[in-house]
Image: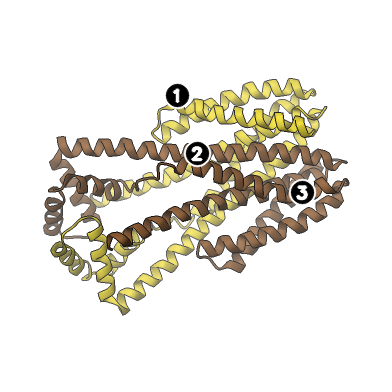
Chain colours: A yellow, B brown
Amino acid sequence: MTDIGYIHHEEHMRSSDLISDIVIGMSDGLTVPFALAAGLSGAVASSSLVVTAGIAEIVAGSIAMGLGGYLAGRTEADHYESERRREIAEVESVPEREKAEVREVFAGMGISPALQTAIADELAKDKVKWVDFMMKYELGLDEPDPNRATKSALTIGLSYVFGGLIPLSPYLLVSHPHEALLYSCIVTLICLFVFGYFKSQVTGQPPVSGAFKVMFIGALAASAAFGVARLFG
Amino acid sequence: MTDIGYIHHEEHMRSSDLISDIVIGMSDGLTVPFALAAGLSGAVASSSLVVTAGIAEIVAGSIAMGLGGYLAGRTEADHYESERRREIAEVESVPEREKAEVREVFAGMGISPALQTAIADELAKDKVKWVDFMMKYELGLDEPDPNRATKSALTIGLSYVFGGLIPLSPYLLVSHPHEALLYSCIVTLICLFVFGYFKSQVTGQPPVSGAFKVMFIGALAASAAFGVARLFG
């Protein structure tokens, strides 16, 4: 792979980070507030209560998921930095042990001992390359984007809010919760289908069956919440 | 690494899959139902309505997250199988292009062209090793556990239910929601702290600051939900 190939590959990874964050946020945002609202529709007499609960859930869920995404990103970046510092120190202080670790990586690939040694000796000539190698192939760590944590938090949080407002909107317009539930089901199941279709395309899955799966999860969660809330309400 | 070393490594990965599923489920389960219940406490007059909404949320959230985990696991397994079939076919039909791809992987590690060729020729002698290599190092895919999807769904779903019942329990025992909220805050913030402490230990982060972070997300989500629900309620 040429340098340009690497850069393109990296950009591809970054844009799929964004898409994966949108998918994470939207998929729960469409499903959980939809099911909560459906559940409450079977237990309360007024849409305004469903709206209050739904909005509380969207706020709670978007903060929990968004900040959760932020902390996960920060943890990943901190972990990478601390492991890198350790590898740099080890390459200086115990080079023979580190060379043995390089040979172990290639032994795991099924490479013969003679070639393992040749590769380890060659890598040891350039300490930057050597540390890069240890990070990626011994520890399996890719260098994280420094802004990933903040972007991830915002993307997941906003996608959750956007997704959550779709199933809730009928309850804002229709005062009787059973009637609002009907519209909410129609609108949300269509959106889940469309969302599932694009999500499957992005992740390289058969889009139509993926769309049905995503819609099925939403419908099941909503039916179960409706049944259980009726039992307890 | 010896064969035994590899097996141990694999087992280590599997047990951390389990822990990571528990962390995923518990962390949202403790936070979102807690914040939803807190939000509703500021807007409604009776604890029983908070319980109904909370239980509907737990059912919705556990199904959405559990089935989401199941589908993610199944997708991963399907993706691995289809990529493996493609690699097996390519090793048979276009071996020279596949050898060039092996060389590219090693070029990316900073290995010299002479050694790249030596390695590619050696790997090409054993087609199983060759395909294993392409799967892991060209595509970055590890063979998934065939039962992972089902285990993952159950673990995430049950952890969500278990986590969600903690903040909700005071509302079952105390009829006035403001009073129940006080107990719910005390119990849940303690649980979030303890959970954050263990989660940080497992992921190799400083446990005390990790515990405060997890507790902070919960407190922020609950305060925001309380404020917003009051505004709309």
State the image coordinates of residue A216 (x, y, percent, origin top left): 55, 27
Residue at the disc numbered 2: B70
Left/right of residue A165 with respect to residue A95 in the rendered view: right
Q: Residue at x 51, y 61 (%)?
A: B203
Q: Residue B91 sits in which quadrant?
A: top left
Query: How many neighbours does mark 1 have within 10 angstroms: few (below 14), some (14-19), or many (20 or more)?
Result: some
Residue B169 — which label? 3
Pointer 2 chain? B
Q: What is the three-letter code of the residue carrying label 2?
A: Tyr
State the image coordinates of residue A122 (x, y, percent, origin top left): 18, 67
Secondary structure type for disc 3:
helix
Residue that extends furthest to the front in the rendered view of this protein: B4
State the image coordinates of residue B218 (x, y, percent, origin top left): 68, 54
Residue at the disc numbered 1: A208
In front of the other: label 1 or label 3?
3
Secondary structure type for disc 1:
helix
